[in-house]
Image (cartoon, grey):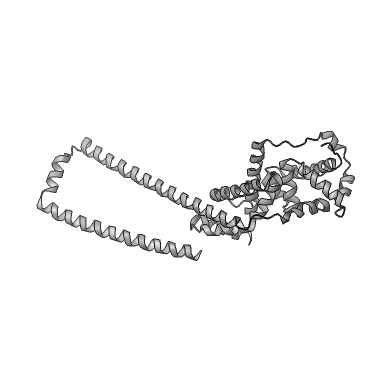
Amino acid sequence: MDNQEEINYIKRILDAGETNLFSYFLNRYSNSIYLLILRIVPTKEDAEELTQDTFLKAYRKLDTFKGDCSFSTWLFRIGYNTAISFVRKRKIIFPIIDESVLENVPDEAVKTIFDKDDDENLLQRLEVAIEKLNAEEKALITLYYMEEKPVAELAIVLEMTPENVKVKLFRVRKKLYVLMNSENL
Amino acid sequence: MKQDKALIKVLKSQKDEKLPTDFNARMMTQIYLVSAARKKRSMVLSYILISTVSISLILLATYLLTGHLSFNFSFRIAASFFSPQSKTIFGFSVYIALLILLLMFIDRFFRNMHEKKRMEKS
């Protein structure tokens, strides 16, 4: 189903009161939203509750969806904002890395290390390093690598410019490299 | 940047995590509740709006009739209720009102039936 058909579904929900059609959006997007939120918040229970909040908010605000982006992008933005608000309230602290350290990381080294997908030790270290990223960075890599969202849509979800998204992606890779190679952080 | 195979592998390995199987059903129950509450709220709001407008119109009419047109209510009501001609008019009005009530009841009955059928289908 393409974006236009999804917009038609939304119109039918709003105009004809066909609430049952909302189950289509649940079936299609609930797991993706859950996985994004699960990356950002600490526990599965929190992620499930926030996924629930996301869909309730989406249903309540359905009339504000103008169709200027895809419905999934709009839904991811609600999910992301819900998860970010939760993290801010809980005041979860993430390690901060000095800018100069990131600038000194050679691009080639980052490229080489992330191109190996058969080294179990490296994959484990990478998993640990991802957990140490802040909420925005986790959302960024989850949407880009796992959901395979294009940069333009990421910019809408994260409310930043496409150029900013590219720069952030580049820096996150460097940050992961630093985190993987330092045990103290 | 999508050649970052290690990153893709680690992130996609989490795709096995799934929501409980009854999540969508539970969610739909909540959505129906929100939808029903919204309908009820809009109905109450429309009743309040209609009542406010009606009362305002009655008050405005009373004010205009008594204040600007020197209309005497007690005299008019007595004259119109107790004449033989007014009794016929009153009887006819009651007959029309009852007919309207009956039609409204039939309309409501068929609407409910239609709504039930639609819910069963969905």
Q: Is residue A182 left or right of residue B68?
A: right
Query: On the picture, is B117 further left or further right than A123?
Result: left
Q: Is residue A17 left or right of residue B111?
A: right
Q: Position of residue B93 (x, y in %)?
A: 20, 55
Q: How many marks?
A: 0
In the image, what residue occupies the spot 64% across and 45% down? A46
Q: Position of residue B112 (x, y in %)?
A: 40, 61
Residue drawn at 72 percent across, 56 percent down: B16
Q: Quadrant of residue A96?
A: top right
Q: Is residue B50 visible?
A: yes
Q: Position of residue A16 (x, y in %)?
A: 48, 58
- Is B17 or A78 nearer to us in this picture? B17
Of the pair A183 and B58, the residue shown nearer to us: A183
Q: Quadrant of residue A182?
A: top right
Q: Position of residue A83 (x, y in %)?
A: 65, 43
Identify the image quadrant of the C terminus of chain A. Answer: top right
